Image (cartoon, grey):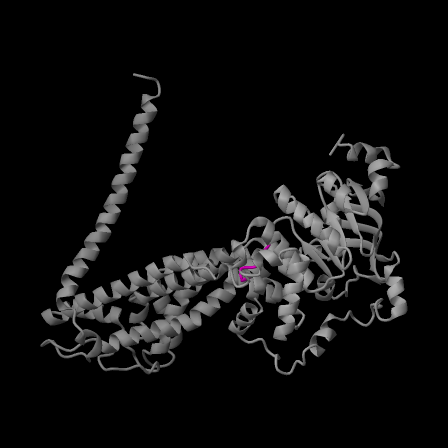
Amino acid sequence: MKPHMGRIWRNRLALTLATCSALLGLALLFIILYDIIRHGLSSLNLELLTEDPAGPMGGGGLKGAFLGQGLLTLVATLVGAPLGVLAGTYIAEYGRDKKISKAFISLCDLAMSLPSIVVGIFVYSLLVKPFGGFNGWAGAAALAIIMIPLVTRTTETMLAMVPWTLREAALALGSSYSQVIIKIVYRKAASGILTGILLAIARVAGETAPLMFTSFNNNHFELALGKPVASVTVTVFQYAGSPYETWIDQAWAAALVVTVVVLLLNILGRLAVKWRF
Amino acid sequence: MTEKGAREEQARPNTNGEMDNPPTAGETKALAPKPETPNLLQSAKDAEVANAPYELLRVDKLGFYFGENKVLKDIELPIWRNSITSLIGPSGCGKTTLLRCFNRMHDLYPNNHYEGQILMEGRNILDKNEDLIWLRSRLGMVFQKPTPFPMSVYDNIAYGLKLKKITNKPRVRELVEKALRQANLWDEVKDRLKENALGLSGGQQQRLSIARSLAVSPAVLLFDEATSALDPISSAKIEEMMVELKKEVTMVVVTHNMQQAARVSDYTALMWLGSLVEYGETTEIFTRPKMKMTERYVAGHFG
């Protein structure tokens, strides 16, 4: 045996192990997808999106839950995305050389790995208990809190990737720093920041736990944020645990819709990276 | 092309104040130097003076510190108007540091300070209360690597004009064209003004950066090894342009390329370890230097 055969075999072993692990992971993902599609597709119909809920006897849809989830996500994005972008801007630009920026980055990483149910309970104690009941604002706030560190971190990373000479060049023309950030740096990092926001939306659009303690659920059509607001994820959670066949089927169909939406948001996010101004 | 430029301009949202700006009023105000700076071209008599050699900048006992580290030591140097002055010297000698003192680029970073003065028409531009935005619009800078902004060719040039509150569309178009012509770039880009500037070649991007600086009509243009990242043909185009530009702007050039210094500059300053070794007319420096070190450096014996 040649002296380097040992290395070749070790390489092959490592390659095999890595490939098998990758295949296993992918296989699990596809089994989940396949299962959702198989169950969901059979009960998927237009009424699911356009009708109000009916009883366990069948029929009806989850209009309120879909619109509610959309509304909660929208409000969360309108609050969370700008805050995240601004926080990221502080860390990458104004606080660039300061110790506090490093502390912020660590805190962001910590917040990102926080179980979302913890956020739910936190918002419950802050916006539900003192106001005497579940409400949509609390749900949106919980989603926004999950979004902020995600958006902050991607914004900060994207801004840091913009070369310094570009800022110097703009400053050397007589711009103020804020003009440089808004007109040049944001423009350069725009696609990256947009991707970060889209991925953050995709992340919160499928959240259940933070909504269970905040916006809760509503069997009636309700889009006033002062009241409990229905959401698809919480409805899926409740329907899937119910004894009624029809509700379980609807839960599968709703889960399929949520999965597809999240998948599309992710794909859109990946595509946005390549988008240029 | 003008049509193209016009459409470009309309596509851009919110150029505010375009209606209440009579064609030139708003912009002449913005272009005029601040009252405390004497305007030498005000009268015919002054125009005569304008052609005479005139010290636009005077570096006076300049010292500069990064933290406690003194990297520039007692620099004394005149910069004559409408001339090209090269700063040469081995790497780390402080020539770029000196160049970045002129437009106060160092102020962007913490823990450094200046000593002494740089006088621009009698005004100390190292003053703590100096208006840096105004100063940097008077002393433009071109960097080693091209720095096109992520926008169209046209918008790159118009960016600086907007900073000067020049928003009258025909005037902006006129100034964009003028700047691109000055930088010898007009013929190459006149049909692609709306295209992203990142699509230009390296040499074109560098001339775009120069045109962008010229558009705000600075008094001085500072070149920080502006041709070192370019191929010989692109460098030659820029050198040619620099010589033409002398009519309108004073230039200070940091270069590692001795031939370039000899070719384009009127005055040359050799620096070594943060000190000025010798300053003089370029022909003197390259043919009859007073210092032994200068002779050895320009002959390529060290550095």
Viewer can see residue B55:
yes
Looking at the rendered image, the quarter that the N terminus of chain A falls into is top left
Q: Is B174 or B282 nearer to us in this picture?
A: B174
Name the spot of residue B241 as percent of width and height, x first: 70, 52
Main SS, magenta region, reads loop
Residue in view at x 73 percent, y 46 percent: B254
Closer to the camera in the image, A228 or A249: A249
- Residue A22 location, x and y as percent? 28, 44
Query: In the image, is B133 to the left or to the right of B291?
Result: left
- In the rendered structure, which segment of residues is drawn in magenta? B146-152
Task: Out of A31 and B291, give the one closest to the viewer.
Answer: B291
Q: Is residue A244 left or right of residue B10?
A: left
Q: Is residue B157 left or right of residue B241?
A: left
Report the front residue among B100 and B38. Answer: B38
* Vertical arrangement, residue B17 with respect to residue B138, above or below: below
Q: Residue at x 74, y 41 (%)?
A: B93
Q: Which residue is depicted at the point 37% across and 70% down?
A: A142
Q: Quadrant of residue A53?
A: bottom left
